[in-house]
């Protein structure tokens, strides 16, 4: 009988030794550069951050600055609202005077009874202007909130009507304002 020979094991080549001094491939060079850049960035961030004791100081300064900004914004809004309230009061008062002046013409053209209705309407509008002038902005805002909660449908309708009037005024170039 013939003897069969077993195949011989092939010897594996020895792994190449890496040199510790310089990277041999481009990928290794990129990795080394990225690591050194990351380390440099970390050092730069560490330098810009305040020491642990001063971190609370920075937060308090930022909070103080924000509080000051909030106070200034509140004052500006309050001043603008007060100015708007004064202008609205003047406008409502002038409407009441216009209605009252028209009452005489209504007496002549339609009748005394309808002129009295116009005078009554002028009195109501004038009373509304007086109430609006007597209240401060916060009280008016609270009254408006209460009214909207009580009857939202009327509030939406009034807002739509006011928006329509304002749009007409803007389109006309503000000549009527």
Image (tube, rainbow, N blue to C red):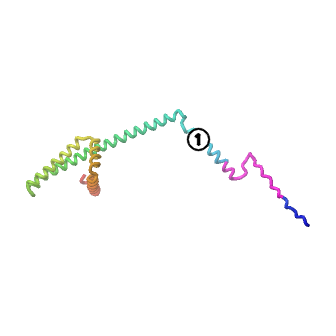
Magenta span: chief secondary structure: loop
Q: Residue furthest right?
A: 1
Tell me residue 148's x, y (percent).
Answer: 28, 49
Q: Which residues are magenta?
A: 9-31
Q: Is residue 15 magenta?
A: yes
Q: Is residue 14 magenta?
A: yes
Tell me residue 168's x, y (percent).
Answer: 27, 57
User: Is residue 124 left or right of 167 when viewed as pictured?
Assistant: left
User: Is residue 169 left or right of 67 when viewed as pictured?
Assistant: left
Q: Residue furthest front?
A: 1
Tell me residue 62's x, y (percent).
Answer: 46, 38
Q: Nearer the viewer, residue 8 or 5?
A: 5
Q: Quadrant of residue 51?
A: top right
Q: Secondary structure at mark 1?
A: helix
Tell me how many marks there are. Answer: 1
Tell me residue 116's x, y (percent).
Answer: 10, 51
Which residue is depicted at the point 48% across and 37% down? 59
Which residue is depicted at the point 24% across and 41% down? 135
Q: Which residue is mark 1?
A: 44
Q: Quadrant of residue 165?
A: bottom left
- Quadrant (top left, top right, bottom left, bottom right) of the N terminus: bottom right
User: Is residue 172 left or right of 53 when viewed as pictured?
Assistant: left
Q: Residues within 10 Å of mark 1 (few under 14, many from 20)?
A: few
Q: Is residue 73 above or below residue 28?
A: above
User: Is residue 147 left or right of 109 when viewed as pictured?
Assistant: right
Q: Residue furthest top?
A: 53
Q: Is residue 36 above or below residue 111?
A: above
Which residue is depicted at the point 54% across and 38% down? 49
Is any atom of residue 105 visible in this view? no
Which residue is depicted at the point 19% across and 48% down? 94
Is any atom of residue 73 visible in this view? yes
């Amino acid at each position: 009988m013939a003897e069969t020979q077993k195949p011989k094991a092939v010897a594996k080549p020895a792994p190449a030794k890496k040199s510790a001094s310089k990277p041999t491939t481009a990928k290794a060079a990129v990795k080394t550069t990225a690591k050194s850049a990351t380390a440099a960035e970390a050092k730069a961030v560490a330098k810009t951050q305040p020491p642990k004791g001063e971190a609370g100081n920075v937060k308090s300064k930022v909070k103080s600055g924000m509080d000051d900004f909030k106070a200034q914004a509140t004052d500006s809004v309050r001043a603008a609202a007060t100015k708007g309230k004064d202008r609205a009061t003047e406008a409502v008062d002038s409407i009441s005077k216009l209605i009252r002046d028209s009452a005489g013409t209504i007496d002549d053209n339609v009748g005394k009874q309808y002129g009295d209705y116009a005078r009554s309407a002028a009195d109501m509008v004038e009373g509304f202007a007086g109430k609006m002038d007597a209240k401060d902005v916060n009280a008016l805002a609270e009254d408006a909130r209460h009214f909207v909660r009580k009857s939202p449908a009327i509030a939406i309708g009034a807002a739509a009507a006011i928006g329509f009037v304002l749009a007409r005024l803007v389109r006309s170039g503000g000549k009527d304002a």
